[in-house]
Structure formats: C-alpha cells, structure tokens
Amino acid sequence: MLINLRDICSIAEQGNMAIASINTPSLEAVRAALDAAEETGYPVIISHAEGHDPFAPLDYMGPTMVALAERSSALVCVHLDHCEHLSYMRRALEMGFTGAMYDGSFLPYEENVDNSLRASEMCSGFDCGLECELGSMGSREAGSRDEGGTAEESCAVYTDPDQAAEFMSQTNLDVLACSFGTVHGIYKGEPHLSFDTLAGIREKVNVPLVMHGGSGVSNEDYVKVINAGIRKINYYTYGVKYAGEAVGKLIADRRAVKSDAVVYWHDITTAAYEVLFSTFCDVIKVFSNGADPMK
Ligand code: 13P
C-alpha cells in the first residue's frame, strides 16, 4: 500500500524508530525490500537514485516500483533519491512516486535554497513529501562504488545547526538530510559519527532527519542515531556488496566441483535475492528500535 514520505516518517517519529530507505536498482532488490517489509511487518521506503539511471532507467524501474508497492500488504513509500534535475523529478512524480529528494548539497547555499523551493512547489501538486539536503556527504551516491572511505577523505561538510534552522525557514521541505560523519560507499575503517552535530541539528530543526550513507554502520550506532532523532536511514552499498560476494561464491563453489560447470543467470539472480532479502530483514528490524511491528 502506497504511503507518502511525510506520513511514513511520522510513523517513525511516533515509534522512535527509523524507516529503512533502500535503493532498489534491480527487480531482485525491489522484491527483496518489499518481501522484507511484509515479513517483518514494518513500513519501508524503496528508493530510486537518479545516479543509478544508467544501469536502472527510471522509465523501467519507476512504474515497476509503484505497481509493486501499491499491491504490497506493507506500507511502502516509493522515493526518488539524490535528484539533481527538476525535470527528472517531474517524471518520477508523474509516475506516482510518493517521496522525492532534491539534492542541492553540492551547490552554493542560495542556489540550494532556490532549487529546493522549486522542488517543493512541484511536489505540492502531487501526494509526495520532499527531502532536501544541507551540508554535504562529499561522495555522491551517483558516483562510482569505489567512493567512500572516511568523511574527511570525501570532503564531507557537516550540517551546521544554525544554517539548518535558516534553511528550514526558507524552504518548504518535509524531511532534512544532514551530514554528520557518514559517507556513501564502502567505509575505510570504522565510521566516526558526530553525535554532537546531530544533537545540535535536532535542537534547531523540527522535521524528521535523514541519515545517508547508512550501510556499513554498526548496530550500536544505528540505535544511537535513531534515539537522537534520525527517522529515515538510507541503505545501499553493503547490501549489494553482500549480494555480489554471494554470487562470486556460488560461481566459485560450482566451478570447484566441475571446472566447466554452467551457471545460469537465474542462479545468479536467485542467490542475490536471497542475500538481499535476509540483509533487508535484518536492517529493518534493527531500525525498528524495538517498536511493535504493524502486522
Ligand atoms: P550507502 O550507499 O552508503 O549505503 O548509502 C546509501 C544512501 O545514502 C543513498 O542515498
């Protein structure tokens, strides 16, 4: 059942939990995320990033995500992630997306404000909540999967709580993505999150907060950020890393028994689906932070 970004985040607020916002640039990932939401009984956000368009075009993924979300028994928000072009956002809205992120975090502040306002005007004509970002993660979700490392290496700019309050008063967004130490991609060593920055933002900003670069973070830190007010956690890289490793192992195991063993495409997609499903079940449960399931 479709739900918009505002309403799904207010469920998270009431339950002191975070909703998993899972990038799903393949049919296996869409299935796994929806099945995991139904299995665990928690709402989920399935997300399409503009930067994934070259290998998962919106024209194919968007209508598939909306149709499967509509018929799911779980509450599902279909969300556009890291959109940098308003014309692209309009296409997603016309397909029935119920959440959208305008990402102007790489732009000068005033330009970010102007474009975020234009995005909010566009979303107001649809049943769609808007997320915007202030501060910068440094590495783009859109970029190569070799990005990542540490927040410093990625040239991340932590969100300034006072500027966040100003940003809120100048734009009309529903949820705010903020930067406080996570990065997109693979972490080099343990991520070091700035809980002081997060507490400062929470004090000044009264909308649900979003953590990007959410895979690869310890369960302990997930619980800490949720208790500090994070209501949406974006999750991608480590899920697809685990799926890739499972596929590699499947091929290696078969070839160890018989060097010319045939591995079919459906063997690969099945192995990937299974790992994605169990990974998504695990993170959805951790992000629920002990809230009762909705089934
Ligand atoms: P990771 O790719 O680090 O999991 O982050 C996902 C994300 O923030 C998508 O917007």
Image: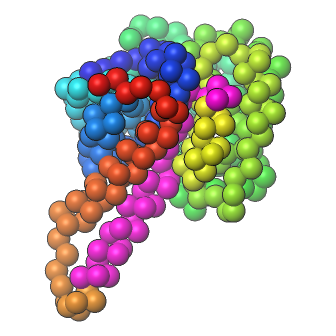
- Look at 35% across and 75% down and name the residue there: 249
Q: Nearer the viewer, residue 58 or 29?
A: 29
Q: Nearer the viewer, residue 112 or 164?
A: 164
Q: Is residue 204 above or below residue 240?
A: above
Numbered range of the magenta stretch: 227-254
Q: Is residue 87 left or right of residue 76?
A: right
- Look at 29% across and 74% down and name the residue there: 250
Q: Is residue 154 visible?
A: no
Q: Nearer the viewer, residue 174 or 34?
A: 34
**Residue 74 location (% of width, % of height):** 29, 27
Q: Is residue 84 left or right of residue 156?
A: left
- Look at 40% across and 68% down and name the residue there: 245
Main SS category, magenta section: helix
Q: Is residue 150 above or below residue 223?
A: below
Q: Is residue 192 left or right of residue 227?
A: right
- Look at 76% across and 36% down and name the residue there: 195
Locate the N terminus and report the quarter of the image it occupies. Answer: top left
Residue 247 on the magenta span: yes
Q: How many marks?
A: 0
Locate the C terminus and report the quarter of the image it occupies. Answer: top left
**Residue 12 location (% of width, % of height):** 50, 22
Residue 232 on the magenta span: yes
Q: Quarter-wise, where is residue 126 in the image?
A: top left
State ligand 1's quadrant: top right
Q: Is residue 276 visible?
A: yes
**Residue 90 location (% of width, % of height):** 41, 22
Q: Is residue 256 left or right of residue 196?
A: left
**Residue 14 location (% of width, % of height):** 52, 16
